[in-house]
Image (cartoon, rainbow, N blue to C red):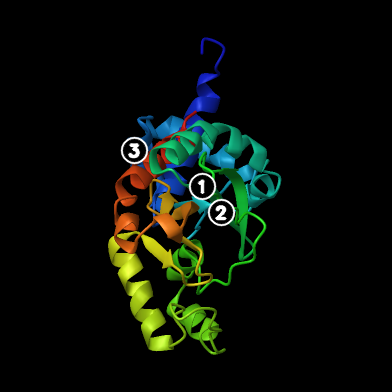
Amino acid sequence: MADRVQAVDRALDLLEEVAASLEPLATPELARRAGINRATAWRLLNSLEASDLVERDPATGRYQVGYGAARFARATDLGSLARRCRPILEELARETDGSAYLLVDSARNLLVVDEVKASGPLQIDLARVQVPLHCGSVGKMFVSTWTDSEVDEFLSSPLERFTDATITEPIDFRRTLEEIRETGASFNYRDHHDDWCGVCVPVRDRARRVQAYLNVTKPTVRTTRADLDGLIAPMQRAAAAIEQAITAR
């Protein structure tokens, strides 16, 4: 810690505050939130702007994350994220007696960052199974983050039925999305296959934007729909721990 460069730390603090705000902020407010004097914040923001990491609106003087940040995002090693979160997934798998998964959105594709399989003899491995969005707990949570027009486009095509529990009516699917937004949890109980069920909760950033998806999947032969409700609390604790892990500097 003694080797850290103060100017770099302060610049990163400012960048964190820009990213954490849902609305662009001006230098005085960013300086206040980062605990930096205005003159220093102004100089550091100029440097960040020169690297396209932040973008300043010339009309309002307010800052938002710049396109340059996308260069780093594209080069991100998901293995680093997996290493940070692995102990949390392992503990969640033990606590829930299910298979735990961490997923992220990449260009509208859900990618499994890491998985920890259940320790019992009955295991469900969905890491390489393509589950339609309207059938899986993660897929439904994912769609719940979309805009109304994006949902309209998704529902413009018929929803395929896989089991008698599959939601195929647009009005029912929209109602499910509203429940997910209100409760912060998504469920699949035999929606795609009679043998498995699952729960999903989001991992969010400081601005409450969804950054990743945490899922636990279990076999239905020893899991009731009511049992899934009992998984929410440990999953939310795990999601909070992951949020801390991925924002720590």
Q: Which residue is mark 3?
A: 33
Q: Position of residue 172 (x, y in %)?
A: 37, 83
Badge 3 crowding class, 10 Å Cα cut-off, few under 14, some 14 to 19, many 20 or more, is: some
Element type at mark 2? loop
Looking at marks 2 and 1 on the same chain, the residue that comes earlier in the sequence is marked by: 1
Q: Amino acid at mark 3?
A: Arg
- The residue sitting at 44% across, 59% down in the picture is 221
Element type at mark 1? strand
Say if 189 sits above or below 231 in the image. Answer: below
Camera-side residue of 17 and 236 = 236
Q: Is residue 180 left or right of residue 203?
A: left
Q: Position of residue 224 (x, y in %)?
A: 35, 60
Camera-side residue of 36 and 125 = 125
Element type at mark 3? helix
Name the image quarter holding residue 170: bottom left
Q: Which mark is residue 99?
A: 1
Residue at the top extreme, as displayed? 2
- The residue sitting at 60% across, 53% down in the picture is 125
Looking at marks 3 and 1 on the same chain, the residue that comes earlier in the sequence is marked by: 3
Name the image quarter holding residue 178: bottom left
Disc 2/disc 1 C-alpha distance (Å): 7 Å
Looking at marks 3 and 2 on the same chain, the residue that comes earlier in the sequence is marked by: 3
Camera-side residue of 172 and 210 = 172
* Label 2 with label 1: CB-CB less than 8 Å: yes
Q: Which mark is residue 186?
A: none
Q: Which residue is mark 2?
A: 124
* Label 3 with label 2: CB-CB less than 8 Å: no
